[in-house]
Structure formats: C-alpha cells, structure tokens
Image (cartoon, rainbow, N blue to C red):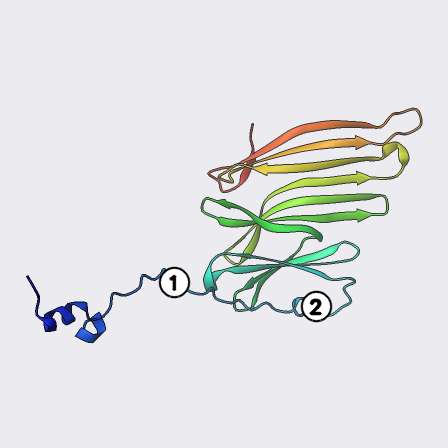
Amino acid sequence: MRLPATLLAALLAPAGLLGLAPPAAAQAPTTPPETACIMPEARSLLPEGIFDQLVTRVTSLGLGANRVLYVGTSWLPSDGRIFAVSCAGKALEEEMIGYIRRMEAGPTLPRFGRTLLVVATTDQQPNSQEDTIKLIAFRQGKFLTLLEHSALTRITAPAKDAMEEAWSWTFSQDGTRIEFGGTRTTPAQGNRPAKREALPKDAYCWGAKNEFEKCD
C-alpha cells in the first residue's frame, strides 16, 4: 500500500518538528562536592615561642562538615602536640604527645568510630630513644588513648647495654584485634657476637568495656 506523501513526511520528521521532546540522555548520578574545611596555620595553634624545625601532619576523619582534622605538630628535639580541629577551623582539644613520627587513620571500632594511630618519640636522651604507638579517639570533646605500646626502644651506651627493640603491628580486618611482633637486636661487643631474636608476641582485643585488653 502506498502512503500519502504528507503522512510519510510526518513519520520521517524529527521528533522536535512534531512538538515531541526527544528522549532525555542518560546521566550519571552526581555526588555533592565535599565541603572544604578550614585548615588553620599551625603556628596559630601553638603558644608564643620558638619551635625549631616545626613539622605539621594532618589527618582528616569523618564526613562532610562534621569531620575532624587531626593536626600533629612536632619540633626538635622531641616535642609535639596533637590538635582536634573542627571543619570550621576551630581548635577543639590539644594534647602533648612527643615528636610525631607517623600519624594516620586507625581502625573503626564499635561505638567509637574511626580512630587515629600515632607513633611518637616519647623519650629522647643522649644515649637512648623510646618511641610509642598510641591509638587515639576524640570523643565528647576529649582525647582518649585507647591503646599504648612500645614501638621502638634503642640504647646506644654504655656499650654493654646497647640494644634495639623494634615492634610492628597488624590489625584484624574488623579492627578489634591488634597483634604486636618485635625483634631485639644486640650489636657485637668484645667476644660477644651480634644477635637478633624475636620478642614474645602481644595481642590486644577490643572488649565490651570499650577498651583494649590483652588476649591470646
């Protein structure tokens, strides 16, 4: 059957010419832009004074405008502070912690949320050094230390006492268990050969009391 020319033209015409809206193009869902937080200048957080070779580290935890910036400041020889700063740039809490060597997000714990892991030199003497790992939470306006363990013990003198104990750690997948493993290294001294040995392992589990307790 032969179609009338006017009907054939209508069928072949673009949809816009017939007063019909063309099909909408598929669009990927958009994610709202992340709220930009205000980062205060590190020296503005500190009291008046001279801070030799000031180093600043920042770790952001949380979402949107409710997240907290953890600002770690360190200066020679072995001092440092950690600050909890609101997304609006207001310092909420501070704590002396030693010279910060490492700072990063820790595990997410039941009833506490995301934690902060800090390794800091907590004691520095001419012939010795002590580094400590701390797992910290910011809760109800205060810092809480949930776990504290040696990360490094180094003695360089007197020679007969020289040794180094270094610890590493691993978290379980859900973050509720942390296991420490370490080695002790003793340098050669006189007729004594150098020695390296494993230290007994330590394990801690997050319990119903909202604290880490030693576990098997």
> Residue 62 or 132: which is nearer the viewer?
62
Q: Position of residue 167 (x, y in %)?
A: 69, 37
Q: Which mark is residue 47?
A: 2
- Disc 1 crowd rating (10 Å Cα; few below 14, some 14-19, many 20+) is few
Q: Quadrant of residue 159?
A: top right
Report, in whole angstroms, how far the alpha carbon at label 2 lies from the one at label 1: 44 Å
Quarter holding the C terminus? top right
In percent of width and height, residue 93 lies at 58, 61
Please tell me the numbered disc located at residue 187. Answer: none
Quarter holding the N terminus is: bottom left
Instruction: Reply above or below: 91 against 76.
Output: below
Q: In the image, what residue occupies the spot 47% across and 64% down?
A: 34
Q: Name, please, the residue furthest toward the right.
A: 190
The quarter holding residue 47 reads: bottom right
Q: Position of residue 38 (x, y in %)?
A: 56, 69
* Mark in front: 2 vs 1: 1
Q: Earlier in the sequence, mark 2 or mark 1?
A: 1
Callout 1 secondary element: loop
Is residue 184 left or right of 9 when viewed as pictured? right
Residue 68 to residue 159: above or below: below
Kind of residue at disc 2: Pro
Rate crowding at label 2 as few (under 14), some (14 to 19) or many (20 or more) other CA atoms within 10 Å: few
Against 144, residue 212 (above or below) is above
Mark 2 secondary-structure assignment: loop
Q: Is residue 139 visible?
A: yes
Residue type pointed to by label 1? Thr
Q: Which residue is pictured at 34% across the width and 62% down the height?
A: 27
